[in-house]
Amino acid sequence: MAITHNLGFPRIGVQRELKKSVEAYWKGELDEAGLRSAGKALRQKNWQLQQEAGIQLIPVGDFAYYDQMLNMTTLLGAAPRRFGYTDAALSLSQYFTLARGDKSNFAMEMTKWFDTNYHYLVPEFLNTTEFRLSSEWLFDEVLEAQALGINAKPVLIGPLTYLYLGKEKHAGLRRLNLLPRLIPVYQQILARLKTLGAEWVQIDEPVLALDLPQEWVDALAPAYEALTASAPKILLATYFDSVEEHAARLKNLPVAGLHIDLVRAPQQAESFLRDFPADKILSAGIVDGRNIWRCNIAASLHTLGPLHEALGEQLWIAPSCSLLHVPVDLAQETRLDPTIINWMSFATQKLAEVSTLARGLAHGKEAIAPQLAQANAALESRVYSPLVHNRAVRQRTAALTAKDAQRISPFTERIARQHARFNLPAFPTTTIGSFPQTADIRAVRAGYKQGRISHSEYQAAMRAEILHAVRKQEELGLDVLVHGEAERNDMVEYFGEQLQGFAFTEYGWVQSYGSRCVKPPIIYGDAARPRPMTVEWAQYAQSLTGKPMKGMLTGPITILQWSFVRNDIPRADTALQIALAIRDEVQNLEQSGIAIIQIDEAALREGLPLKQSDRPFYLDWAVRAFRVCASGVRDDTQIHTHMCYSEFNDILPAIAAMDADVITIETSRSDMELLEAFRKFSYPNDIGPGVYDIHSPRVPGTEEMLRLMRKALAVIPAQRLWINPDCGLKTRGWPEVEAALRNMVAVARQLRSSAAI
Ligand code: GLN
Ligand code: ZN
């Protein structure tokens, strides 16, 4: 029978036990021994659960108290030297300091793991970086698993991926040149694993699914030739996209097995199958590790059939990638509609699906008749369910024309009308939307959700917050005001909860970074907006002031990106459905007297496909979705958008194509570096480059903000510049927000009176 294995399991625990223990340790409520025993208990539970699900080779080494890349950094003795940790092995508290920083060191940088919402800690490399086997954690965990009778398959992040995902901190250093220093340490690690009796080791090289520069591709074969000598059998794992272009090379590598992702890239099976070496294993990643839908057992068997026929026992069955990216166990969900529950599968269920597939291949469909019948019934109920299909929505998206994605007049005419209507001063000041989410606000929201606070009490409390925020902004002298978003716990959840076609789990947590977990909404059906979602709050806020009140919405791509998305229709279709819902909201806001509306697209960039060749298509439908939201309004209604990242040099034309009247972006942390791109590409509309970093409680002085604005003025004409912070202020406290905004307004006044305009 085909061997079943798993690439990685979520480490947080069904009840987020890891989060709770780690945070208790940080607060000093749990000592190191306590945290370590909580970690040990979790590992044991996860291994046994996988074993019981019928998984034969179980990943060990996928557990981490904070992050798997950080674990690799400690194993390789590559903690950034700036922390000054000279001892070979790091203590647990030093490990956390790398991740979180302390008084004298800023934390290691964090960034997204490929196109997932998981963040890893970025390795830092110097010319003098040396690697040295510096930790026992991996070997300890292998021994721990073996003692429990677990058939352990240690997992490591591969040397190419480790280097590629890191950053050079010395000019002129090319991190690929560090490979010869890195290989001996990997050799040592592999030799130790072999001594421990590990038959297989999984080495992850997901960078192979990117557009990897040729010199990196060329480094692959020599690296793995060097690694195999005294190693256990190596299973080289790739995932998240196709590695078809490297198929010939991969088949020739001196490794014992290859894992490929057949969910994201089913078409690559054929290239691998052709002349597949008789002495290698091909691991088929067939159960979706990135989404929560139940596996179509019949269709998967159909895909696996030819592979099984050709490869026999050389074929292994697995999820497409580590299950880190899905919640732990569906059995916990009791409040969701049982029909919808029946369509889904979380990590635990996915492993059962893997073993069902293996049995089906080995013994025929009869052997898995009940599972097959259940999967088919679930699938069928989903295909025909009235919960999924909304005719009106389908008809509306089908009837959309180019005109629906086009404002009435071009920007130059619109902005003239908007200037006449708002009569704002030069360098208008505004904020990104949210004001401090105080403990009081959170308590009221929680109380209302749990039914302890009545609707009218809740409404009164939120209105009081809005009033407070409006008065503060007037006092500070801001030009375009916001209501403050007190009623929102999260910019996606708030809308998802009011849209049809969205479901929310109770325990569907996924690790985002460190101890932080998110519970993404599940989009299961056609998206529709039964009634206005934000109009009452915005209208109330506008009634309090003579200044323009900005309506605040989340855009379709951000909603899509931070949810588990349907797999029965293209993402682009779901985006368009959400876009229509937001368009209706935009129009209702306009009708109720809101003249400026911001549609946040915080996640537009992170939705970019991994491969360059897939990007134009994505940007095309993403931009269209935004334009559909924004184009149903009059010329003198001003559309803003906001994006909180500073790396979009490469997508500036797409951002310009969104045609928002005003865009606010993050720039302060990168010292307006982004604006360099504006030298080369002349962005046509208004722009508010963030002048201060909201991630820190530090109050920025007028001088530094003035300096940033002068930098901006060098590339953007004064009449198109706005002044605003980098992002929303919800994580800050009022005193620092007031001080910072007071300075920001002072900067605007200074600029207005200077010769700059
Ligand atoms: N309007 C949101 C806020 O101010 C935007 C948040 C974001 O971009 N992440 O909080
Ligand atoms: Zn932001």
Image (cartoon, rainbow, N blue to C red):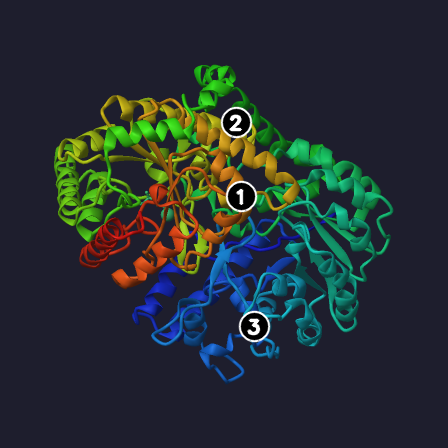
Instruction: Specify which label sits upstream in the sequence, 1 or 3.
Output: 3
Q: Position of residue 100 (x, y in %)?
A: 40, 67
Instruction: Specify which label sits upstream in the sequence, 1 or 2.
Output: 2
Which residue is rendered at x = 31% and y = 47% of the image?
757
Mark 1: few/some/many CA within 10 Å (<14, 14-19, 20+):
some
Question: In the rendered picture of this protein, how many numbered marks are placed on residues?
Answer: 3
| Amino acid, disc 1 | Ile
Give the residue at mark 1.
651
Q: Position of residue 173 (x, y in %)?
A: 62, 71
Q: Using the rendered view, name the quadrant where residue 483 is placed.
A: top left
Q: Secondary structure at mark 3?
A: loop
Indicate yes or no: mark 1 CB to ligand 2 under 8 Å: no
Q: Position of residue 187 (x, y in %)?
A: 71, 74
Distance Cα–Cα, label 1 vs label 2: 22 Å
Front-most of residues 360 and 699: 699
Cβ atoms at labels 3 and 2 below 8 Å apart: no
